[in-house]
Image (cartoon, rainbow, N blue to C red):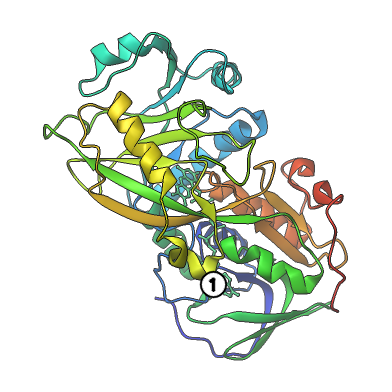
Amino acid sequence: MASSGTGMGDYDCLVVGAGIEGCATAYQLAKRKYKTLLLEQFPLPHSRGSSHGHSRAARYAYHDKIYADMMREAFPMWYHLEQETNTTLYRQTGLLILQEPSQGSFEARLQTVKDLGLQVTQLNGEDLNKLYSGVQYSNDHKVFLEHKAGVLMANKCLTSLQNRFIHFGGKIHSEEQMREIIPGNMVRVRTNKGEYRAKSVILTVGPWAGQVMKPLGLNPPLKTWRMNVCYFKEKQPGTFPEFPIFAELACNNRYIIPNHKWPGHLAVVYGLPAHEYPGMYKMGYYTGNEAVPPDERDKFAQGVQWDIRIMQKYVRDHFPGLEDEPAIIEQCMYTKTPDEHFILDKHPVYPNIVFGCGFSGHGFKLAPVIGKILCELAMGLPQSYDLQMFSLKRFDKQKRLPAKL
Ligand SMILES: Cc1cc2nc3c(=O)[nH]c(=O)nc-3n(C[C@H](O)[C@H](O)[C@H](O)COP(=O)(O)OP(=O)(O)OC[C@H]3O[C@@H](n4cnc5c(N)ncnc54)[C@H](O)[C@@H]3O)c2cc1C
């Protein structure tokens, strides 16, 4: 599907990075008839960024209302993509938010779901034990079930967006790495295969954002984290396929990494039904293991994997129906900002260079809306959302590197 680059050409827009955010952005551009090229450094599909794998959770239960508002638009957009591609991309499973008293953002999330008028059921730990076999919670746990939440089939979402992008006339060049950006009225982009010119360039380079932004004089405080995703096997086959997504918030009193290098971050253990591996349940630890450079993700995997140990403890404490040794472990990357809000902004000096990055481990579900926002920013269209909280300016206290150009 993706072609190798011709290395020449003029475009309305050039999008760098074919993860979920770049693909959703390219789709929006091509659908609006902008002549668009999507560049990707690796062969597609690949598993070295943040968007690979089979599943991502989609939910409304956010602490910050703006994300819930965006989800109101994102859900129908995913549905529309399903219709366009005749592909099932979403499975409604429900989402359990759990929290021990006086910790985390449980109440705010519950209020968000209620304010949207969505179906929600409040429970406690023992209700859960009765409803589902294989789990064990005490009544100290407050719980609510957001019924509409569910699982996006991540790989299928990616290929569906790529297919539609090409259908609308877009071009994908995989195995072509952007090496240099030369600002101007027409931005010049040099790659390992040639040079292009575009009225606007959108950089959706995921964990590579820090290194791509530096030569443009920007140094936002981004950290890239290696995340282990564990699949735990059911002791009794058939126990967990109907168990919803769950997220236990701020359980950092019992589930915290010793000497964690970025304190203050929300500690969350979460899980999803693993339809990709029948007989297993998928879990992750949102806080992450340690910050690593994206090109050396696995070099650092030799030491103690605290996040895996924490998930194992969580399984022993709350999922007696699962074996506590992960049967499969996969890796992925988070790119976190200190406030865990995204960066959706133009370059302060070169407004036809636009950034979409810092998705902090929660950007997949919102990709259709992110794509629309980045398209609006790059093409000078009216903005659908107030983007203040996603600005680069919020890091102004941080030292900015001098622009090379
Ligand atoms: C374990 C895990 C679980 C998650 N769970 C959820 C969830 O349940 N719900 C949710 O909403 N989100 C979730 N997320 C977050 C979500 O997956 C990410 O926010 C999202 O995938 C980020 O996509 P991206 O396009 O920004 O980055 P990526 O997918 O990394 O894409 C960036 C692309 O840019 C390319 N690139 C970089 N530099 C260059 C260059 N110089 N030239 C050409 N190409 C380049 C890279 O190769 C890469 O393909 C999860 C993430 C992980 C890791």
Image-based side of 260 in relation to 248, left or right: right
Q: Is residue 260 above or below residue 165?
A: above
x 47%, y 85%: residue: 4
Cβ of mark 1 under 8 A from ligand 1: no
Q: Residue at x 55, y 16 (%)?
A: 114
Residue 151 in sight from this viewpoint: no
Q: What is the quadrant of residue 183 in the picture?
A: bottom right
77 or 263, nearer to the observer: 263
* Residue shown at the point (72%, 67%) measured from the top left: 213
Q: Report if residue 354 is visible in the image.
A: yes
| x then y, percent, for residue 159 | 40, 62
Location of residue 351 in the rendering, given as x and y in whole percent from the top left corner: 83, 64
In this picture, is 285 found above or below 221? Answer: above
Quadrant containing the C terminus is: bottom right
In the rendered image of this protein, does residue 136 appear above or below residue 41? above
Q: Amino acid at mark 1?
A: Gly
Quarter of the figure with residue 8:
bottom right
| Nearest to the observer: residue 324 or residue 169 | 324
Outermost residue, left direction? 236
Is 228 drawn above or below residue 113 in the view shown?
below
Observer-nearest of 98 and 119: 98
Quadrant in the rendering for residue 271 = top left
* Residue found at x 49% / y 57%: 50
Q: Which residue is mark 1?
A: 170
Q: Which residue is at the front of the view, 302 or 54? A: 302
Count all numbered tags in the image, as a single digit.
Answer: 1
Work out which quarter of the rendered image holds the N terminus and state it.
Answer: bottom left
Indicate the position of residue 157 as horizontal and vertical percent values: 41, 54
